[in-house]
Amino acid sequence: MEDFTLVQAVTIFILITFAGFIDSMAGGGGLITIPTYIATGVPAHLLLGTNKCVSCISKSLSIIRYIKRGKIDFKFILPPTIATFSASLIGAQLSTILESKHMVYILILIIPIIFFMNHLKKKRELVDHAPLEKIQVLFRSVLIGLVIGGYDGFFGPGTGTFLIISMMFFLHFDILDASPHAAFMNYVSNIAAFITFLIKGAIMWKIVAIALPAGLLGNYLGSNQVINGNKATVTTAFNVVLVGLLFKSIYDISTM
């Protein structure tokens, strides 16, 4: 692969910045980063490793900022995070045995349901409901971690977004509370994959040199929206990711 032109480098920087901005709030950054790396000419065997490298290190900035601002409740988040990580490992093993590509059909069915759940959640916010007991929160959060963690390891797209809607609907979280906790769970579940790619040397550092500063900038700007309570921006990002997932799934099916 030859060196990048100035136009290519600037394009990569802009797109990865936008991806980090979206991903830090609503997940789904891979919808932008993966096509960007493919268009840039990253070889297939280095594609996922390069993406994990940039996204994991970039998201570290968001996670650190959320922790410093008290946006992450560790008493709550540790059990579901462990569940997510464990289920992700199992899902990854299953993906080597079963055909994960057919998950795209299920994804097309799931996304409209998520839109409906989000709409229903908004209506429920207008009605007072009793707070969940601690044991209910523990059970539901661990179950969320197991289901979505398994999905992450087996297939993957939209994991952070699905964690957010699950917390909003089943745990009665506000999107500004769900976003940093979902980011933390997704981040931890991705660390093992990043380390694996790093050990195997499956990372294109030439791309990382341009994309990593962009990802850090995007995550900084996006986490600002959550920290400052800009609910409208975070909600818009969430809906954009869902629409993007739907169109990507339709495209994937059309090219099978």
Image (spheres, grey):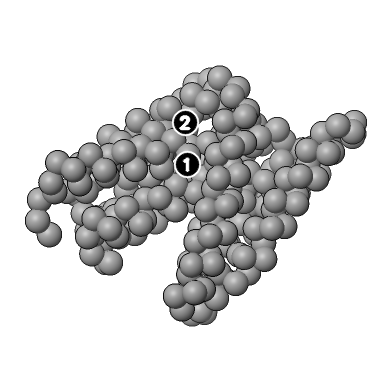
Residue 249: x %, y % from top left: 53, 65
Residue 70 in sight in this render: no
Whether residue 142 sits left or right of residue 70 in the image: it is right
Residue 123 in sight in this render: yes
Q: Is mark 1 on a helix, strand or loop?
A: helix
Q: Nearer the viewer, residue 177 or 42?
A: 42
Whether residue 246 sits left or right of residue 252 in the image: it is right
- Disc count in the image? 2
What amino acid is at disc 2?
A: Gly
Q: Name the residue under label 2.
A: 222
Q: Which mark is residue 201?
A: none
Q: Nearer the viewer, residue 165 or 255?
A: 255
Q: Nearer the viewer, residue 202 or 112?
A: 112
Q: Name the residue under label 1.
A: 23
In the rendered image, the vertical position of residue 25 relative to residue 158, given as above or below = above
In the rendered image, the vertical position of residue 164 relative to residue 105, given as above or below = above
Q: Which residue is drawn at 54% across and 67% down?
A: 250
Whether residue 94 sits left or right of residue 139 in the image: it is left
Residue 185: x %, y % from top left: 55, 44
Q: Residue at x 54, y 48 (%)?
A: 241
Determine the image quadrant of residue 118.
top right
Q: Nearer the viewer, residue 202 or 219?
A: 219
Distance from Cα at disc 1 to Cα at disc 2: 8 Å
Q: What element carries label 2?
A: helix
What amino acid is at disc 1?
A: Asp
Contact, CB < 8 Å: mark 1 with mark 2? yes
Residue 85: x %, y % from top left: 53, 53
